[in-house]
Image (cartoon, grey):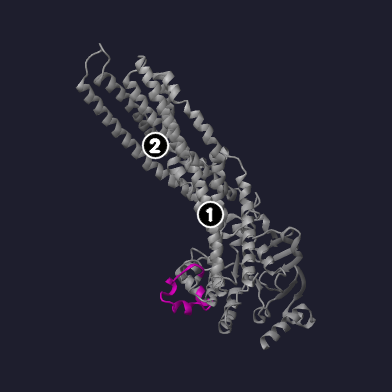
Amino acid sequence: MNKDTSRTQGQKAGAINKGERFIYQDDDAIEKPFNWAQMRRLFHYMAPYKKELVPIIAAMVVGTLTRLTVPALFIWAIDTAIRPPEGEGEPSVPLLFTLAGAMVVLYLIQWAANNYRIRHTNVIGQKVIYDLRKHLFSHIQRLSFRFYDKRPAGSVLVRVTNDVNALQDLFTNGVVNLLMDCVQLVGIVLILLIWNFQLGLAVMITVPLMFIVSTSLRKRIRFAWQDVRMKQSRINSHLNESIQGMKVTQAYVQEKDNMRFFNNMNEVNIKAWNKASALNQAFGPIIELTAAVGTLILFWYGSYLIQAGFITVGILVGFANYIGNFWDPINRLGQMYSQLLVAMASSERIFEFIDEQPTVGEAKNAAPLPSIRGDVKFDNVVFEYEPGRPALKGISLNVEAGQSIALVGHTGSGKSTIINLLCRFYDPVEGKVSIDGVDIRDVTIDSLRSQVGIVLQDTFIFSGTIRDNIRYGRLNATDEEIVEAAKAVHAHDFIMSLPDGYDTQVEERGNVLSMGQRQLLSFARALLADPRVLILDEATASIDTETELKIQDALKTLLAGRTSFMIAHRLSTIRNADLIVVLDHGKIVEQGTHDELIASGGVYNGLIEAQYRFLSA
């Protein structure tokens, strides 16, 4: 086996393992039985539109009644106006024209009712989809970081887009059509049994047989559509990963392997879709065959009844018309069941997210956090991202309002974890974090985070204008305040050098800007938010030396009167901090000022010496 082949197979194995992880998660849902309670929960989204449904249902009833009345006029026309029984009068052309005119009127009423029904059900259906997507998106915004830690972004994306879109047909046509077809079927069955019980029973004897055969397909079809949703989720996850990591893919010349893996996933998706579609289409031939058998029975037994004098030719023609109208709703109900299966597969995945509860939640009696001074305390805090693997081990730290704290340590020592707990992205397993003596778990999350600002190393820039991105720190800020914030952090000059200044459009993640420019915008955003506690997470890591000199001046303005936590490795950033906390494997091993820690000759001194050796190399 050559090296390239081994590498490719290894990648495939990893991809398969990754895929199996998704399959396992989704197979849990596949094993669930058809849940009508869940479908009722789905239909609950139609409840706000009950009043709007009343005229739609009325139009449906009118359209169904006119459809049921037309065959009766055919019978009247044949048995009375065209070929009346012997001794009961002569054929009547005026009556025939009258009945024909009545049919035209009924068809027009049916057309108008159906047109009204279709137009307004589409409107309500889109409103329901809007409400569902809004509810889902609102909910996933409240979910904690643990939820996103274990799910790729593409998997979340497919729930909000594909799975919600899969419900459109159900809400725009399916529900009302289901009612209409049920009413039509009940009406046809009653009419046929009233006109001639024996003939009506004979032509419908094939219906139970059809349901027995089709029932065996239902479970297979449901599983098949759930499998399709799972495969589509995997494709979306891979697409999101590939797009986000395109630079890495191209840098390591992995386009072919990436394409090979994508093609494999695509082929699996096609096979799953074809299987589900083939099973879905099996309903049609079953119904057509059943209809053909029913029609043969109708004309065979109906001819006998005519000869025996039990029914007239008009009755037979009416039966044939009603039977034609009988199998159409049966066919639509079969399709509707398939639609319900698709909806079931999608709704399971949607409600899986909606039922997910934030691991970081608000207490029932949570109160808004008043305006804070900025005293922060970590009291014997223990935290684990995964059970049995503590990231923090009994951290205790007192920070007074207005102090600047630098967190220093090797990668994985727990620096970012402290920041995550302070922002309540996660909650401690043991101990507590308090601000101004108040446990942050006892206050509302919004009131806490509105007073805590954060500037990350990997600054996220939203698609929109430069002005909008800075205003994200405080949405009600004026244009003048935005400019003032940009000037304070020395971002104004580079912004004005752009083609449209503050109105320059930037794409997602701000790819038209340099890393340093994006960080300057994040500084302006944080300054505009005016938080009492400010977090700088490697915020100056990607800024050149010249810009850093400006940033140091800006930091004096930014940090003035605020409690600040800084994660940084540059000596220039941390040496003036009021307190430097050195972490190692989740524990505080040293703390003090720069001069005190240098004099002690401990871990911090070793880190600084290593930095000097690196810079002088």
Name the residue nearer the viewer: 275 or 390: 275
Q: How far across and down, in percent of the image, does residue 462 sit?
A: 50, 66
Closest to the observer, 286 or 31: 286
Neighbours of disc 1 within 10 Å: few (<14), some (14-19), many (20+)? many
| Residue at 57% from the left image edge and 45% from the top image edge | 223
Point out which mark residue 186 bears: none
Give above or below for 52 relative to 275.
above
Q: Position of residue 66 (x, y in %)?
A: 34, 29
Front position among marks 1 and 2: 1
Does 105 appear above or below 467? above
Q: Which residue is mark 1?
A: 269
Q: Position of residue 185 (x, y in %)?
A: 43, 29
Determine the image quadrant of residue 124. top left
Q: In this view of the protein, which residue sits in the foreground, 397 or 589?
A: 589
Tell me the magenta residue range.
Answer: 485-509
Measured along the vertical axis of the image, is residue 371 above or below residue 345? below
Residue depicted at x 76% and y 66%: 396
Q: Which residue is mark 2?
A: 56
Taking the magenta stretch, the answer to whether it contains residue 25 is no
Q: Residue at x 23, y 14 (%)?
A: 89
Taking 514 as reference, is 273 above or below it?
above
- Quadrant holding the N terminus: bottom right
The secondary element bearing badge 2 is classed as helix
Q: Amino acid at mark 1?
A: Asn
Label 1 vs 2, first from the N-terminus? 2
Is residue 504 a member of the stretch shown in magenta? yes
Q: Position of residue 111 (x, y in %)?
A: 31, 36
**Contact, CB < 8 Å: mark 1 with mark 2?**
no
Q: Amino acid at mark 2?
A: Ile
Residue drawn at the location 60% of the way across and 46% of the way down: 30
